[in-house]
Image (cartoon, grey):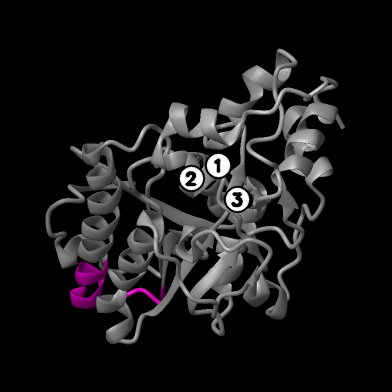
Amino acid sequence: MPAGRVLVSGVSGPIGAALLPTLRQNGYEVVRLVRGSAGGKGQVSWDPGKPLSPEAVTGFESVIHLAGESIVGRWTAAKKERIRSSRLLGTQHVAEALARAPQRPRVLISASAIGFYGSCGDEILREESSSGQDFLSAVCREWEASTSPASRVGIRTAQARMGLILSKAGGALPQMLPPFRMGIGGRIGNGRQWWSWIHVDDVVGAILHIMRTDALQGPVNVVAPNPVTNAEFTKTLAQVLHRPGIFPLPALAAKLAFGQMANELLLASQKVEPAKLLSTGYRFLYTDLRSALEKLLGTA
């Protein structure tokens, strides 16, 4: 007998690729929220920019909302608008439809990001820490607020503030690998900025933990408990690949190459603690960066 029906958006990304088979292995019936025409009973069609029918999202135990424009790439005005609108409108339409659904879900888990905090140097950031003042911080605040139609009607709602996700299927790691494998990788800027990382298997584990833990609602930091500086991250990656890793990318060069994205992603410092996950008993599979990278890259 299935553990329950789960509706998932954003299934084409690295989280979805790992999450869907795990949900099925745990006995859940998975239905995907997909753009364009639905291809079968395991899919629901939607357009993130348009309202969603409440009848289309009724009868699910849990809803996991991951969809949103990739933040990777030069942030032109058009790119920034896609980043913002894809998150705000999509999340708002999902939350509004769930609030009006004949059978509401027990829980809505909506993706967010540690970009909420902005760049904070060596400050330890927990879920109650204040938000930053940059573009990503503003997007994250509005993104999280867009879930309010669901929480207002009593749906337990959690915003999963995700850090740097380590996955071979997408995200930052595959883009970092080529220069490091060629031996021309190294720290970015002065390397003192904190990078809060998490193995994709722990992202999946955290999502299941949030689904099953009634005490968890509101923002939840989805990061490993041991953040590292960029210098330590890049040094460890080079060592795992058995390459030198001694060619730094100066901050100015990063800004010239990536524009605003360099300031808010590559050079930003976010030392984030997964306080709520730890306090509710989540056991991380990977707490050490080296072991996480070795597992992903097959060098263990």
Reading the image, the residue beneath label 1 is 266
Label 2 residue SS: helix
Inspect the image, locate mark 2, and give the three-letter code of the amino acid beneath it.
Answer: Asn
Circles 1 and 3: CB atoms closer than 8 Å = no
Inspect the image, locate mark 3, and give the three-letter code of the amino acid beneath it.
Answer: Gln
Circles 2 and 1: CB atoms closer than 8 Å = yes
Reading the image, the residue beneath label 2 is 263
Nearest to N terminus: mark 1 or mark 3: 3
Residue 256, by quadrant, is top left
Q: Residue furthest top?
A: 182
Could you say where residue 160 lies in the image, as x and y percent from the top left? Answer: 50, 64
Q: Residue at x 82, y 20 (%)?
A: 243
What segment is highlighted magenta in the picture? 95-107
Inspect the image, locate mark 1, and give the three-letter code of the amino acid beneath it.
Answer: Leu
Label 1 residue SS: helix
Q: Residue at x 83, y 41 (%)?
A: 290
Residue 93, by quadrant, is bottom left
Q: Residue at x 50, y 65 (%)?
A: 117
